[in-house]
Image (cartoon, rainbow, N blue to C red):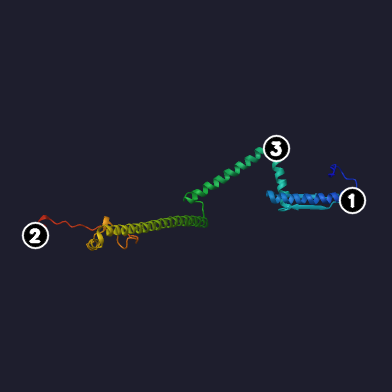
């Protein structure tokens, strides 16, 4: 037979009441701990027995949980009162206006405006802040330029590898053409043709074609023009 349903009412027997309290207390503490771990919730549990003994559990701090509860309760009570709610939003608006004003003043100081009321120490602090900001900007710029250079180098290496592969394919086609030329015209004609510098199908590849080209900038050569009289005499 299944276990009967227990009526939710005070247990008259002292021994049974104490046993039930011990079992239910352990289960309640276990559930509170699981709730805090599984749901990332802030849990605070207080239990007083009939004899006045205290049992508690808190995953953070019982004092902080109680303070948070009192603060939340006060805010909730204030929001329920229309007059308190208006005062609350007025204070929030005043705080935001003050923060905006401070930001505008700092921005003008950073731009070099409205510096007449500052002391030498304040100006030195402002200068240090500007130098730190400038250093951060330069560091970010150098980082971006370095990344771009690395990307260009990577692309250059890929293009160089593609050129090497193309060079190998061209040499392979050249060898195949030489073999075909030998089969068609014979070895003698091939040697004669190659001795004169003739390559079938117009393939002419140097040995250093796979070496990457190194480009340099040079100044344009100035051309000298002679008069017709001097050109005739020199001729």
- Identify the image quadrant of the N terminus: top right
Q: Nearer the viewer, mark 2 or mark 1?
A: 1
Secondary structure beneath label 2: helix
Q: How far is mark 2 from mark 1, CA to CA?
A: 139 Å
Q: Earlier in the sequence, mark 2 or mark 1?
A: 1
Q: How far is mark 3 from mark 1, CA to CA?
A: 46 Å
- Quarter of image, res 175: bottom left
Q: Which residue is mark 3?
A: 80
Q: How far is mark 3 from mark 2, CA to CA?
A: 112 Å
Q: Which residue is mark 2?
A: 233
Q: Residue at x 55, y 47 (%)?
A: 102
Callout 3 crowding tier (Cα within 10 Å): few <14, some 14–19, many ≥20:
few
On screen, residue 150 versus residue 34, left or right, reads left
- Identify the image quadrant of the C terminus: bottom left
On screen, residue 23 versus residue 111, left or right, reads right
In-front residue for pair 43/84: 43
Q: Position of residue 28 (x, y in %)?
A: 78, 49
Secondary structure beneath label 3: helix
The numbered mark at residue 15 is 1
């Amino acid at each position: 037979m299944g276990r009967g349903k227990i009526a939710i009412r005070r247990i008259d027997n002292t021994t049974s009441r104490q046993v039930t309290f011990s079992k239910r207390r352990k289960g309640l503490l276990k559930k509170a701990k699981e709730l805090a771990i599984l749901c990332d919730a802030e849990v605070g549990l207080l239990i007083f027995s009939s004899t006045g003994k205290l049992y508690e559990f808190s995953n953070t701090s019982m004092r902080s949980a109680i303070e948070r509860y009192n603060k939340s309760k006060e805010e909730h009570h204030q929001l329920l009162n229309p007059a308190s709610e208006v005062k609350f939003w007025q204070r929030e608006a005043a705080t935001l206006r003050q923060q905006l004003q401070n930001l505008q003043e700092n921005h003008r100081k950073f731009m070099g405006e409205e510096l007449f009321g500052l002391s030498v120490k304040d100006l030195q602090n402002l200068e240090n802040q500007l130098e730190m900001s400038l250093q951060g900007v330069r560091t970010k710029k150098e980082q971006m330029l370095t990344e771009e250079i690395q990307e260009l180098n990577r692309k250059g290496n890929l293009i160089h590898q593609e050129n090497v592969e193309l060079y190998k394919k061209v040499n392979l086609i050249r060898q195949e053409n030489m073999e075909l030329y030998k089969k068609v015209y014979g070895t003698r004609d091939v040697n004669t043709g190659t001795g004169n510098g003739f390559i079938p199908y117009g393939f002419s590849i140097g040995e250093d074609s796979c070496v990457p080209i190194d480009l340099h900038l040079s100044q344009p050569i100035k051309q000298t023009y002679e008069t017709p009289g001097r050109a005739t005499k020199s001729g």
